[in-house]
């Protein structure tokens, strides 16, 4: 649990003005209509058309299950999460050069085309039977492939694969602890942990203490991925580990409408929220794509953004990086990850430990849709990139900029805040 953790999910909303909420709801309605309507219009289109069906990636496998097969389906349009986070704006500043992200999961395939040449494996973690660790690593650092618009958050960062489970994805506190230790010993600057466990252990506490000593930022899923058993959604909110541990940046998942996915586990508090429902990613074999859901994927987006921050602000400590990610996030019940604001934020001497002030100014924050009744996105069907980008631009121009001016946001160095570039 990071410093200052305790963001209650009911407090922030009460402080928002009703006009601002209505404006955000309108923006969400426009954006979601484009996504869902565009997909429904061509449910069987080829990859080069307006939509494509993708296989669902599992979080773990049964003991007798075969390893996850390679996907031949490619998502050629910009995924909703990539456009919603406005990553193209953050990439104007940095793409994560010089930073290594440890992925503690089911392993990371060293042969994944989008990660080729940038994965170092700890022990046997260079193979991935389940595919989940490779999927998360792709969200963090996948490079763009020919004919495909999907790209990882920090696509010039390196990945250090550390196994936090057995080969089929079953995990424990001690396995996660060993994975964290492997990532830290291997020189990771940021570590993302996919597991959300009901309890910790002495070994896990020791591993987190080592990470803190070595100035490594640990990011973790605040809750497990979607429940396996019916009725699990009725469980009361509770803490999960290592996300609830001191110094760990905990992350919740959001769907395309900015809501928690239906049936998700809940927790009393979390540091950040990020896309994590129906997101596109790579797999352990071939060059196709999969669809995945869960807070573990949202943690991957936050870890990638932490890599961007540590690339552009190498003077920041792990704790200061976590504070910057929280303070630059878009205000909400659980603050929403905003990569561009994070990499362009003005830093004080306290942030840099006395190293000086970086004279960057942030533009308007990322637009994450919210306030509409939401259900989980389970279909691997994606809208035409052109139509999606147009709707994002309309929402940006009509809602975000006027609101930003009313709130006194400062312009970027180029002048007035500009609409996000269409990624289509």
Image: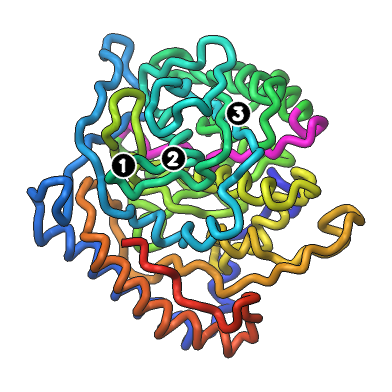
Secondary structure state at the residue bearing disc 3:
loop
Magenta stretch bounds: 211-229
3D distance between C-alphas at marks 3 and 2: 35 Å
Closer to viewer: mark 1 or mark 3: 1
Colour setup of the view = rainbow
Q: Position of residue 272 (x, y in %)?
A: 57, 54
Q: Is disc 2 surrounded by few (<14), some (14 to 19) or many (20+) residues within 10 Å?
A: many
Q: Is residue 415 visible?
A: yes
Q: Is disc 1 surrounded by few (<14), some (14 to 19) or many (20+) residues within 10 Å?
A: few
Report the front residue among 340 and 415. Answer: 415
> Splitting the image into 4 quarters, where does residue 173 fall?
top right
Q: Is residue 306 left or right of residue 323?
A: left
Tell me, yes or no, whether the highlighted magenta stretch contains residue 274: no
Residue 391, placed above or below residue 296: below
Report the front residue among 274 and 50. Answer: 50
Q: Is disc 3 surrounded by few (<14), some (14 to 19) or many (20+) residues within 10 Å?
A: few
The residue at which mark 1 appears reads as 146
Tell me, yes or no, whether the highlighted magenta stretch contains residue 224: yes
The residue at which mark 2 appears reads as 143
Secondary structure state at the residue bearing disc 1:
loop
Residue pictured at 39% horizontal, 43% vertical = 144
């Amino acid at each position: 649990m990071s410093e200052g953790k305790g963001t209650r999910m009911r407090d922030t909303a009460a402080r928002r003005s009703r006009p601002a909420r209505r404006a955000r709801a309108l923006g969400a309605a426009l954006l979601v209509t484009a996504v869902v309507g565009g997909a429904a219009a061509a449910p069987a289109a080829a990859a080069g058309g307006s939509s494509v069906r993708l296989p669902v990636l599992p979080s773990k496998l049964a003991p007798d299950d075969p390893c996850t097969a390679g996907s031949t389906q490619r998502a050629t349009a910009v995924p909703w999460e990539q456009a919603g986070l406005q990553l193209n704006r953050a990439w104007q500043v940095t793409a994560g050069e010089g930073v290594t992200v440890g992925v503690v999961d089911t392993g990371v395939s060293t042969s994944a085309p989008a990660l080729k040449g940038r994965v170092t494996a700890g022990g046997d973690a260079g193979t991935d039977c389940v595919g989940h660790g490779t999927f998360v690593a792709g969200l963090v650092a996948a490079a763009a492939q020919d004919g495909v618009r999907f790209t990882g958050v920090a696509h010039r960062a390196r990945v250090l694969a550390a196994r936090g489970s057995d080969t089929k994805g079953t995990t424990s506190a001690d396995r996660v602890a060993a994975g964290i230790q492997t990532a830290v010993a291997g020189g990771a600057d940021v570590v993302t942990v996919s597991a959300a466990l009901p309890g910790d252990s002495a070994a896990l506490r020791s591993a987190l203490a080592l990470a803190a000593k070595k100035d490594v930022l640990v990011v973790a899923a605040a809750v497990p991925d979607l429940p396996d058993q019916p009725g699990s959604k009725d469980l009361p909110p509770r803490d999960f580990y290592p996300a609830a541990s001191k110094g760990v940046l905990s992350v919740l998942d959001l769907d395309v409408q900015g809501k928690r996915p239906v049936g998700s586990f809940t927790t009393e508090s979390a540091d950040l929220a990020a896309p994590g429902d129906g997101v596109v990613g790579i797999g352990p074999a071939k060059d196709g794509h999969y669809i995945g859901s869960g807070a573990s994927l949202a943690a991957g987006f936050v870890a990638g953004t932490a890599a961007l921050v540590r690339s552009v602000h190498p003077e920041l400590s792990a704790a200061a990086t976590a504070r910057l990610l929280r303070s630059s996030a878009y205000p909400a019940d659980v603050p929403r990850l905003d990569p561009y604001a994070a990499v362009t934020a003005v830093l004080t001497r306290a942030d840099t430990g006395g190293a000086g002030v970086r004279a960057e100014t942030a533009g308007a924050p990322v637009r994450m849709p919210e306030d509409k009744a939401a259900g989980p996105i389970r279909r691997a069907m994606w809208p035409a990139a052109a139509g999606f980008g147009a709707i994002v631009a309309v929402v940006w121009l009509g809602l975000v900029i006027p609101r930003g001016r009313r709130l006194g946001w400062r312009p970027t160095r180029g002048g007035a805040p500009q609409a996000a570039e269409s990624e289509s």
